[in-house]
DNA sequence: CCCTGATTCGC
DNA sequence: GCGAATCAGG
């Protein structure tokens, strides 16, 4: 396709901008078109732009932990840390371009139905029935008043402790959720 | 196996 | 100067 494409001033300018903005070589190559990431890296070095950030990083990221709260005994979802991302200013281009990757719109966490709680709020007298995917921040425990001596509330105890013989009848909502 | 950048070296 | 091949690492 593109016949005489090479490192024209425009392409170099774009390369500089994207590279200094933290784009990876492969992404830049894709945007430029007609070149491989190797070509981009090679050019970057020849231009003396190499060595910006460590591999894998794309922006300066500062992580502020909410509070080093008491460690839960179990590996559990930790409240999302406050993350501050600062795009590095591009000296050559005062007019900041709109970041290709806009802030991710976090889905509005499912509003806690009833008494759902995180492990941090889970107390001895609360139902430990898991709700949701333990690998996600949305993971919760039922949290309702548990039956004394049991880890579950009446509702979940019924599901958890079904007699093998009668299981077939109420095998209904045995699924999590 | 996906990705990242760094380096080498024939062209 | 260019960039594929290769290397080193996450």
Image: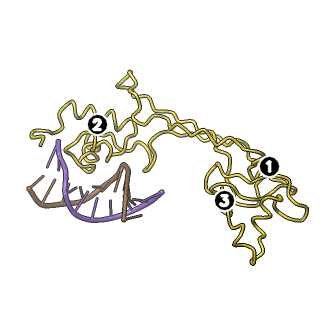
Chain colours: A yellow, B brown, C purple
Characterize the local packing of mark 3: few (<14), some (14-19) or many (20 or more) Cα atoms within 10 angstroms. Answer: few
Residue A140 versus residue A164 in the image, above or below: above
- The chain letter under disc 1 is A
Residue A8 in the image: x percent, y percent?
17, 33
User: Judging from the image, what secondary structure is the residue with disc 1 in?
Assistant: loop
Q: Do the residues labelled 1 and 3 touch (CB within 8 Å)?
A: no
In the picture of the structure, the residue carrying the numbered disc 3 is A176
* Along the viewing direction, whichever of A94 and A70 lies nearer the viewer: A70
* Along the viewing direction, whichever of A9 and A134 lies nearer the viewer: A134
Q: Give the mark, 3 or 2, whose residue is nearer the N terminus.
A: 2
Corner quadrant of residue A147: bottom right
Task: Tell me: A4 left or right of A44.
Answer: left
Residue C8 in the image: x percent, y percent?
39, 62
In the picture of the structure, the residue carrying the numbered disc 2 is A15
Residue A60 versus residue A170 in the image, above or below: above
Identify the residue at image location x=74%, y=50%: A118
* Along the viewing direction, whichever of A34 and A147 lies nearer the viewer: A147
Residue A154 versus residue A92 in the image, above or below: below
In the picture of the structure, the residue carrying the numbered disc 1 is A121
* Along the viewing direction, whichever of A175 and A151 lies nearer the viewer: A175
Task: Tell me: C7 left or right of A68.
Answer: left
Corner quadrant of residue A164: bottom right
Residue A111 in the image: x percent, y percent?
68, 40
Distance, label 1 to label 3, CA atoms, is 20 Å
């Amino acid at each position: 396709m593109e016949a005489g494409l090479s490192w024209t001033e425009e392409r170099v300018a774009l390369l500089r901008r994207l590279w200094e903005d933290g784009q990876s070589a492969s992404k830049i190559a894709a945007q430029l078109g007609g070149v491989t990431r190797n070509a981009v890296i090679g050019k970057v070095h020849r231009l003396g732009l190499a060595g910006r950030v460590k591999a894998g990083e794309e922006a300066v990221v500062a992580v502020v932990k909410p509070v080093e709260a008491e460690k839960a005994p179990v590996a559990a979802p930790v409240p999302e840390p406050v993350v501050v991302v600062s795009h590095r200013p591009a000296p050559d281009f005062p007019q900041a371009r709109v970041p290709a990757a806009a802030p991710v719109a976090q889905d509005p966490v499912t509003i806690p139905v009833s008494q759902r709680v995180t492990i941090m709020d889970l107390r001895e007298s609360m139902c430990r029935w898991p709700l949701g995917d333990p690998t996600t921040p949305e993971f919760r425990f039922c949290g309702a008043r548990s039956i004394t001596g049991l880890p579950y509330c009446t509702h979940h105890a019924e599901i958890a402790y079904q007699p093998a013989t009668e299981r077939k009848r109420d095998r209904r909502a045995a699924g999590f959720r």
